[in-house]
Every structure is written in C-alpha cells, then in structure tokens.
Amino acid sequence: MLARGLARRCPVCGQGRLFRRWFTMVERCPGCGLRFERIEGHWVGSLGMNTIVSFCVLFVVVVGGLVLSHPTYRMAPLVLTAGLTAVVVPLAFFPSSRTLWTAIDLLMRPLEPGEVQGGADPGRRD
Ligand SMILES: [Zn+2]
C-alpha cells in the first residue's frame, strides 16, 4: 500500500492517473471510487510529510555541501543548491506526498464499509 502511494497510485486498488495536472488530484479514484480526502483536513498530513521530507533532503544537501567544500567552504554554490532544493523538492514530491499520506491514513484508519466499490479492503487482517 505504501509503495502504491509512493508511486502516485491509489493505495487501495493501484489505479494510476490520479492527477489531472501535477498539482490537481481527482476527487475519487477512477478504479475503486475511494474519496481521497477521507476527512476534512486530510491533506494537512500530506503537507506535513512533504515539509519533513523537504527539510530532510535540504539538511542532507547542506551538510553534504559543507563536507564536500571543506576546507574552502565556498558559500555561493552551496546557497544556490540549497535554494533550488528548497523550491524543487516540495514541488516534485507533492503528488507522491498526497497518495503516500492517503496510504498511511488507510493504515491508521482502515477502510470503512462503503468507502470503495467492489469490497476491496486492504485493512482487513484475517
Ligand atoms: Zn482505487
């Protein structure tokens, strides 16, 4: 389920093409009918996860840049790279953060009856 989410696919059925544009997600999965915004405020989790991932990548870039530029510490390339990272990573990760967050949400709050068509229930543990 997490791999499907990371691949920008529906965590329940694996359906792709969930985004009309990079930032525009369909309301419901065309495969199973899952409404992605399961509760009001659902996307706050994906925003938080995107922020955490972006800061982790930025941290690695800054520390890696400092280590690689030791002992001269040329700041201009490092600041430029860090700035690009801070802009590009959250934008690039945006769609995956939404579907991955939906997968995490489904692991924490399994599907309830009627949420999808066809009775797919990845939360069932029997
Ligand atoms: Zn689906």
Image (cartoon, rainbow, N blue to C red):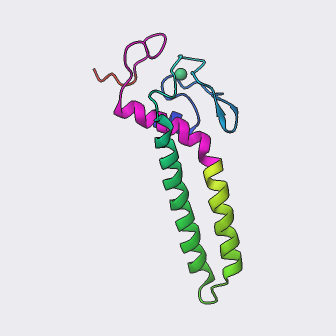
Left-right relation of 9 to 123: right
User: Farthest residue toward the front?
Assistant: 40
Instruction: State left or right for residue 31 relative to residue 80.
Output: left
Q: Is residue 27 above or below residue 100?
A: above
Q: Position of residue 17 (x, y in %)?
A: 66, 27
Q: Nearer the viewer, residue 118 or 102?
A: 102
Tell me, yes or no, whether the highlighted magenta stretch contains residue 114: yes
Residue drawn 59% across the image and 85% down it: 70
Question: Where residue 4 sits: x, y (%)?
Answer: 52, 33
Most extreme residue toward the left is 126
Q: Residue 40 lies in magenta, yes or no?
A: no
Magenta stretch? 92-121
In the current view of this chain or complex, which residue is farthest to the bottom? Answer: 71
Quarter of the image where one finds residue 107: top left
Q: Based on the displayed image, in which of its 4 quarters is residue 16 positioned?
A: top right
Instruction: Name the residue at 61% across, 40% down.
Output: 95
Residue drawn at (46%, 42%) of the image: 45
- What residue lies at 47% left-to-right and 10% top-to-bottom? 118
Q: 14 or 42: which is nearer to us?
A: 42
Image spot of residue 30 (x, y percent): 60, 18
Number of on-image labels: 0
Q: Position of residue 39 (x, y in %)?
A: 44, 28
**Vertical comparison of 112 with 85: above or below:** above
In the rendered view, tell whether residue 71 sits above or below residue 84: below
Q: Is residue 108 left or right of residue 48?
A: left
Please identify the quarter of the rendering in which residue 87 is found: bottom right
Q: Quadrant of the C terminus?
A: top left
